[in-house]
Amino acid sequence: MCLPDMSMMQGRLLVCAWEAGLTNVEEAVASLVMQSVEVHTSIMKLACEQSVIPD
């Protein structure tokens, strides 16, 4: 599995923001989303290895 890089994430956030009528996305938002995706992916990988989904 390949996670998106920071520039792709920021680009996707800009598209979503534009669709919602916004004009800008702070770089910190893209960083926060990337960190969240990495943590979620790690948790899901661990859960799959243990065949248990955490609360």
Image: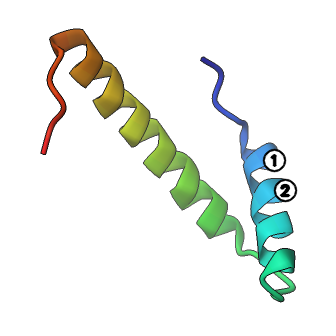
Question: What residue does disc 1 label?
Answer: 7
Q: Where is the C terminus found, in terms of image quarters?
A: top left
* Rendered location of residue 27, percent (x, y): 70, 66
Q: Residues within 10 Å of mark 2 (few under 14, many from 20)?
A: few
Q: Which mark is residue 41?
A: none
Residue at the outermost top position = 49
Q: Nearer the viewer, mark 2 or mark 1?
A: 2
Q: Where is the N terminus found, in terms of image quarters?
A: top right
Tell me the residue at 61%/67% (across/down). Answer: 29
Tell me the residue at 78%/68% (across/down). Answer: 16
* Rendered location of residue 25, percent (x, y): 75, 75
Q: Residues within 10 Å of mark 1 (few under 14, many from 20)?
A: few
Mark 2 → mark 1, Cα distance in angstroms: 6 Å
At mark 1, the secondary structure is: helix
**Is the Cβ of the residue at disc 2 closer than 8 Å to that at disc 1?**
yes
Q: Amino acid at mark 2?
A: Gly
At mark 2, the secondary structure is: helix
Between residues 32 and 15, which one lies in front from this camera angle? 15
Tell me the residue at 18%/15% (across/down). Answer: 51
Tell me the residue at 14%/23% (across/down). Answer: 52
Q: Amino acid at mark 1?
A: Ser
* 12 up-or-down from 54: above or below: below
Q: Residue 12's quadrant in the figure?
A: bottom right
Left or right: 17, with 44 as reference point: right
* Rendered location of residue 48, percent (x, y): 28, 17
Question: What residue does disc 2 label?
Answer: 11
